[in-house]
Amino acid sequence: MAIVLGANQYGKAEIRLLHVSRDGGTHMIRDLSVSVALSGDLAATHLTGDNTAVLTTDAQKNTVFAFAKEYGVDQIEDFALLLARHFVDSQAAISFARITVEQYPWERLGGHSFCRSGREIRTAMVSYDGHDSWIVSGLRDLTLLNSAGSEFWGFARDRYTTLAETTDRILATAVNARWRHASPLTPEEGSGGSMGSGGSGGSGAGWADSYGAARDLLLAAFADTHSYSLQQTLFAMGQRVLDGRPEIAEIRLSLPNKHHFEVDMSPFGLENAGEVFYAADRPYGLIEGTVTRNEAPPPGKAW
Amino acid sequence: MAIVLGANQYGKAEIRLLHVSRDGGTHMIRDLSVSVALSGDLAATHLTGDNTAVLTTDAQKNTVFAFAKEYGVDQIEDFALLLARHFVDSQAAISFARITVEQYPWERLGGHSFCRSGREIRTAMVSYDGHDSWIVSGLRDLTLLNSAGSEFWGFARDRYTTLAETTDRILATAVNARWRHASPLTPEEGSGGSMGSGGSGGSGAGWADSYGAARDLLLAAFADTHSYSLQQTLFAMGQRVLDGRPEIAEIRLSLPNKHHFEVDMSPFGLENAGEVFYAADRPYGLIEGTVTRNEAPPPGKAW
Amino acid sequence: MAIVLGANQYGKAEIRLLHVSRDGGTHMIRDLSVSVALSGDLAATHLTGDNTAVLTTDAQKNTVFAFAKEYGVDQIEDFALLLARHFVDSQAAISFARITVEQYPWERLGGHSFCRSGREIRTAMVSYDGHDSWIVSGLRDLTLLNSAGSEFWGFARDRYTTLAETTDRILATAVNARWRHASPLTPEEGSGGSMGSGGSGGSGAGWADSYGAARDLLLAAFADTHSYSLQQTLFAMGQRVLDGRPEIAEIRLSLPNKHHFEVDMSPFGLENAGEVFYAADRPYGLIEGTVTRNEAPPPGKAW
Amino acid sequence: MAIVLGANQYGKAEIRLLHVSRDGGTHMIRDLSVSVALSGDLAATHLTGDNTAVLTTDAQKNTVFAFAKEYGVDQIEDFALLLARHFVDSQAAISFARITVEQYPWERLGGHSFCRSGREIRTAMVSYDGHDSWIVSGLRDLTLLNSAGSEFWGFARDRYTTLAETTDRILATAVNARWRHASPLTPEEGSGGSMGSGGSGGSGAGWADSYGAARDLLLAAFADTHSYSLQQTLFAMGQRVLDGRPEIAEIRLSLPNKHHFEVDMSPFGLENAGEVFYAADRPYGLIEGTVTRNEAPPPGKAW
């Protein structure tokens, strides 16, 4: 049996970019980490070291910086789409590009002064195959905790099950969510396809509005769902987003169960009535699930 | 020359504690990491393994949890002081205790729902020697950026100096600040010495008010100081805190210079007029300094 | 369009387990992190909070510890397979299990004394669907550097390409490799299927020998390949493993290009002839690829 | 009370340097992280932003790279001393320099091929005040475990003590050790003062021999000390180093107690006879102590 090259990709990862724009004395900043992954007809460099088809990862980095200058950075979905299209459309050997962006949040202190806010990191992953584009938006590190309204009982029991049932526990997680917009963008829509064009995503205020609304729906569903399992909370969060945002076709949630164990104080003659908890690091539960529409368009190459 | 035991201490580090208190359906939470360090007459365990004088680090951990139950957790300075006094006053062999606390910030989403806020971590370090107590409050990971109002020129030049002078640069840092309250607490003041008692610290609302005001002064000084060096900004930040808060005797600041380099776009035929920057990880400048009063009481065993 | 539950899984992650076995005064240790992910008919807990089908992640953790006691821990592939089969075969609702294990390396200092060795972390990922099992072995964090024998030139050039061609550069990476064994194990082979049974993997000395040989082939290929691109080195490493180990059907490599830039010393009047390099953190190149056999059995549910 | 500037220092931190030297086809590499901290008459930049006395941290970085070219990098103590003397002796405003170096270990795979070894990181901290120099060598992240030969009993008991006594526990730690060489170097000794010159440290093979021997003594003492407390093991490790190495005056050890808890299997009807342990992350014990000679020269500005 011959040994052959299988699936492969390459690119520059974690390009740390700060973009500053000015409106008189008022500055706006975007603080990003951009990663590029390209694939296509790259057999030669693997098999013989012939780099004719290889756009260097250094040039990819330069392109990210240059595009920030030439086009500005407003919504990360648009910026990623510009980059994805550029690499595929300009390089004969490249047939697929995926651009992943993380945006770090800052609060304004003054006209040109900012304070990093740690609440969550906004993400985008944009894929382009030379014809269609797929947009996945999301967030990570949104850490949430309910100190009431969470139960866990009625679960399966086997020889190794020792966990006590509870009708009152701490429920805490760090939300990692990614959601796919309803339909691929086709090139005719340009890089500025609007939210209204077929519910297929959008640009400018569209992406920002969609993001803010989805995040708020996640927060609201976490806060007001009386939970019998973290799985139930996960589904409720996804359902709330899809109910509220028709432009979103599917959402994938990864929710670590950040365990908080009630400390047993009976050895000290004290009763701990849900007051003092130990926050454990490891191990942790990890609950992952997808919530989608039953007639959602196929995901294509979105993920 | 005989080989002898020198300075030593021991304790339990990074006890992760969540405390929940309830006011009807409205919950309050405190999310802490508590570290204990004790010293005293501990030669026996080092020299012979005789543990008679050793209060186990496991018992120290239990004490932290039990005190959270027995006394609640309001201001971390008070909670740390209770613990420091307990260990020294109850253990014959222990003559000095230092309790270090980190408090992680949460925003309220609902009556019993919370979202972790990442803006900064509040800290306290309390030391007690059986007679006096010293209180150091502080914060870390307060990440700040000015996109204007920062210059750097007129510096020394040697053979290895290649840096260009600039009248417009990005200034970014992650503030690590610790400030010493003006005078030690003596036991007669009890664990609830107020802000008014000699300006020496305080309890309850006092610590919270002092903390919030100091943080806001740091933010304001960073934002409105036209900077010729990060050292100048450091001194301005410390001076602003001391000017505004008579209860604070001394502040120590450690400010990494988080470099943002303007990307040279001339190879691409573009001009980058302060728009696109590369955020570097390492190396970084590290500027550290103390701002104090010239008649401040001596620090004693505060640090 | 109705909103529905899509793909989902859950389990306990990063169970940190130390297993000690004794042969007289000589101890052997295994230091593992074990993660469990289960899927199947879990709609009820997501949709209604009915946990009847949910084996708790706490019980999963207990099972990992109990199996370490009952069966010992020798090769991580065997240990993972035991666990995967247990969860699917004992729980009616669970139709698929994936067990991921990391093994931390220790060197012997004495009969019962050990020193952590940091060279690389061994990994295994075992999947089981109630009928077939798939075994993926691997390693991560194997950090390698060649200070000669690496060139990079002849690459594509566009407007944003500024990188100079080089016939002598530092090549450094941290190898993350995972390789799939040639055929799924069927239950009749038992948990102790040998290396000889159809080349399908194996147990005991088999897994250890296979692992050690694969790692050594990776090291040798990195060291003795004259490289014209990291892609070429990647393919050479994969090819070497498949050439040497018939039991391996496919290998996936993820190789960050850990850039080391030659410092320009001309401003100081010095010539840096490949002596002094700056090790950059970010961004980094990321080269990922698969090397396989053209008649390899299909991967099934291995990945 | 006037507000004044107190103690301060500044410098470039974590300069990541790879140095390659060649002996025919055989290369030697040094992989370092170098941090510079300078202090002196720096009031002007703090108080007015006058940077006349400020050698930029960028120039400090350049100096580190240039010195690696001009003088090579052999022993990190010597390299740090060269740098410390340079900054103080060449800059009128700088009266004190401290250079901290970490050296990452690599194993040889071939003439110019290397594999990162994770066993421990070697460290040096060199201080110079314009007249005297102080040399502190050390290591960190040397992770050790004894699976027998460790007891812990006879400890103090209070209301919060619940820990069971044990005559057989796992003892694990990650050694952070720093040791001060016996006497300061004076400038007349030059940068190449030998081990023989007053037992005061030394250069070249001297530092390497001293380091290797000290590390081996730490390993041996950990492995062969029957332990009744981690404090006892700490003292034994320090004592062993001082006993064996007359050039070392003092050693400071910081030893986290990396707890491994025996899993209680009685709920599953199993007996865990010291076979299966849970490796906890936090909290952890932290045992810190100094071992010194009773007539050691004073530490001066070494720490």
Image (tube, coloured by chain):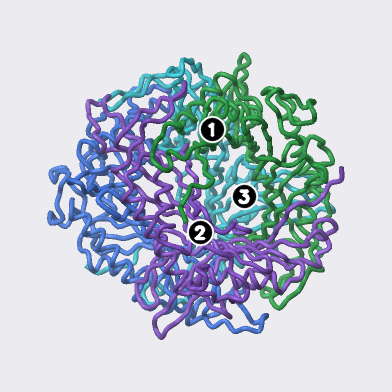
Chain colours: A blue, B purple, C cyan, D green
Left or right side of A33 for C178: right
Q: Amino acid at mark 2?
A: Ala
Can see residue A14?
A: yes
**Residue ID for mark 1:** D94
Mark 1 Cα shell of 10 Å, populated few (<14), some (14-19), many (≥20): many
Name the foreground residue: D281 vs D110.
D281
Q: Which mark is residue A260?
A: none
Q: CA distance from mark 1 to mark 2?
A: 27 Å
Q: CA distance from mark 3 to mark 2?
A: 51 Å
> Is label 2 in a helix, a strand or a loop?
strand
Q: Quadrant of residue D129?
A: top right
Q: Amino acid at mark 1?
A: Ile
- Find residue B174 and report its horizontal and vertical position in percent: 43, 49
Left or right side of C229 for C1: left
Numbered disc in front, either 3 or 1 = 1
Chain label for disc 1: D
Left or right side of D164 for C12: left
Q: Amino acid at mark 3?
A: Gln
Name the foreground residue: B138 vs A242.
B138
Residue at horizontal 30 percent and vertical 39 percent from the top: A97
Residue closest to the far bottom: B24
Using the image, determine if residue C91 lies above or below residue C17.
below
**Residue ID for mark 3:** C103
Q: Which mark is residue B249?
A: 2
Mark 2 Cα shell of 10 Å, populated few (<14), some (14-19), many (≥20): many
CB within 8 Å, label 3 to label 2: no
Left or right side of B185 for D212: right
Chain label for disc 2: B
- Find residue C32 and report its horizontal and vertical position in percent: 62, 54
Name the foreground residue: A75 vs C110.
A75
Are the residues flagged by discs 3 and 1 from a single subunit? no
Residue at horizontal 54 percent and vertical 73 percent from the top: A277
